[in-house]
Image (cartoon, rainbow, N blue to C red):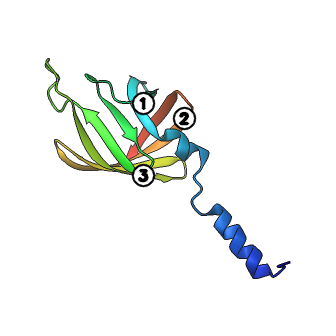
Amino acid sequence: MITHPIFYSILLCLSFFGLKSDTEKDIIGYWNLKNVSDDNIYEYERLKSFKENDGGIAFLADGKYINRNSGPCGTPPRHYSNHEGKWDFQAKKVVIDYDHWMGPEKTSWEIISVDKGTLKLRKIGK
């Protein structure tokens, strides 16, 4: 039987390798904006995929981020397109880096709460 302390240290380190927090795992998916509160909390509902004629955001497990929007003009008929980038989870915030019709954007969002059906975010900086 192996009882060397280095063996146990290595085993402990390996047991944490690749583990994601529950919050990080819970935000993975497709989200549709439901509401923006007076105190700038963005509330999203979980979707199985993007709706055909609606916007949304997606956090994919491989770190890919998708912002689906209709661009600068809200005049019907609206045409939606996906703008791709990447996201990174950092404690209780998510940092998003992507390109859209106005150019590159990097923003940070505080994760207020997340569960199986709802995600609440507050923008905390560019």
Q: Residues within 10 Å of mark 3 (few under 14, many from 20)?
A: few
Label drawn at residue 5: none
Mark 2 and mark 1 in contact? Answer it, CB < 8 Å: no
| Number of numbered tags placed on the structure image | 3
What amino acid type should be assigned to the residue bearing mark 1?
Tyr
On the image, numbered disc 1 is attached to which residue? 42
Confirm whether residue 61 shows in the render. yes
**Which secondary structure, mark 1?**
strand
On the image, numbered disc 3 is attached to which residue? 62
Measured in 3D between alpha carbons, the distance from the residue under mark 2 to the one under mark 1, in whole angstroms, is 12 Å
At 49% from the left edge and 47% from the top edge, which residue is drawn? Answer: 93
Where is residue 57? Give x, y as percent. Answer: 35, 36
What amino acid type should be assigned to the residue bearing mark 3?
Asp
**Which secondary structure, mark 3?**
loop
Mark 1 and mark 3 in contact? Answer it, CB < 8 Å: no
Placement of 117 over or under 95, stated as above or below: above
Mark 3 and mark 2 in contact? Answer it, CB < 8 Å: no
Q: Which label's residue is closer to the chain start, 2 or 1?
A: 1
Measured in 3D between alpha carbons, the distance from the residue under mark 1 to the one under mark 3, in whole angstroms, is 24 Å
What amino acid type should be assigned to the residue bearing mark 2?
Val
Placement of 97 over or under 55, stated as above or below: below
**Which secondary structure, mark 2?**
strand
Residue 68 figure quarter: top left
